Image (cartoon, rainbow, N blue to C red):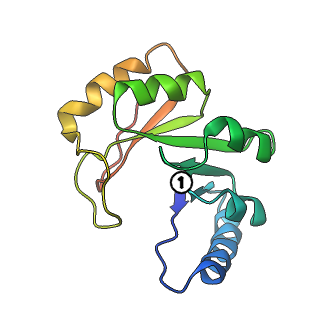
Amino acid sequence: MLVCLSNSLSDGLLQFLEIARQSKTICTKYKVPLIINDRIDIALAVQADGVHLGQTDMPVHVAKTLLPPGMVIGVSCNNVNQVRKAIEDKVDYVGIGAVWGTTTKKLTDPIIGVRGIGSLLQALDGTFIKAVAIGMQHCVSRK
């Protein structure tokens, strides 16, 4: 189990910070990792277990200079070139997709569908990088 918290709140940063703090308390109690989406500052403030970065967010190499050792870093990938870059950046996991449409945000990349997952997972072969699917109700896991 994993909780990924995203700032889709209209009330702003302070509300998101408070929800992140409360989420961290609950996640710690039940030994569930908390990953903060996009916001390294919030992840650091609540001592989250990790951060998820999109393709237009802070570059992974910069994030690594700001985050403590051992903090999980994930990155969104929509094509094989992005997966290769994630491998080069030595991220902990990639979020593949969007596999299907989502109502949580406006998509900037094309929906890859279930058939598009295969080539991205294949690019991860021989690595220890994990993968999760984005934009769907069920998780896709790769061993």
Q: Position of residue 29 (x, y in %)?
A: 70, 66
Which residue: 73% across, 39% down? 64
Q: Is residue 89 left or right of residue 134?
A: right
Q: Is residue 18 left or right of residue 88?
A: right
Which residue: 30% across, 55% down? 107
Quadrant in the picture for residue 39: bottom right
Which of the image's four quarters has the C terminus? Answer: top left
Q: Amino acid at mark 1?
A: Leu
Quadrant in the picture for residue 17: bottom right
Which residue has dot 1 on it?
A: 2
Q: Is residue 37 above or below residue 92?
A: below
**SS at circle 1:** loop
| Residue occupying the far bottom of the picture | 11
Quadrant in the picture for residue 102: bottom left
Q: Position of residue 114 (x, y in %)?
A: 20, 37
Say if residue 143 shows up in the picture.
no
Instruction: In this rendered view, identify the residue nearer to me: 36 or 62.
Output: 62
Q: Position of residue 82 (x, y in %)?
A: 43, 30
Say if residue 4 shows up in the picture.
yes
Q: Is residue 132 above or below residue 18?
A: above
| Residue occupying the far right of the picture | 68
Which residue: 59% across, 34% down? 92
Q: Position of residue 108 (x, y in %)?
A: 32, 52
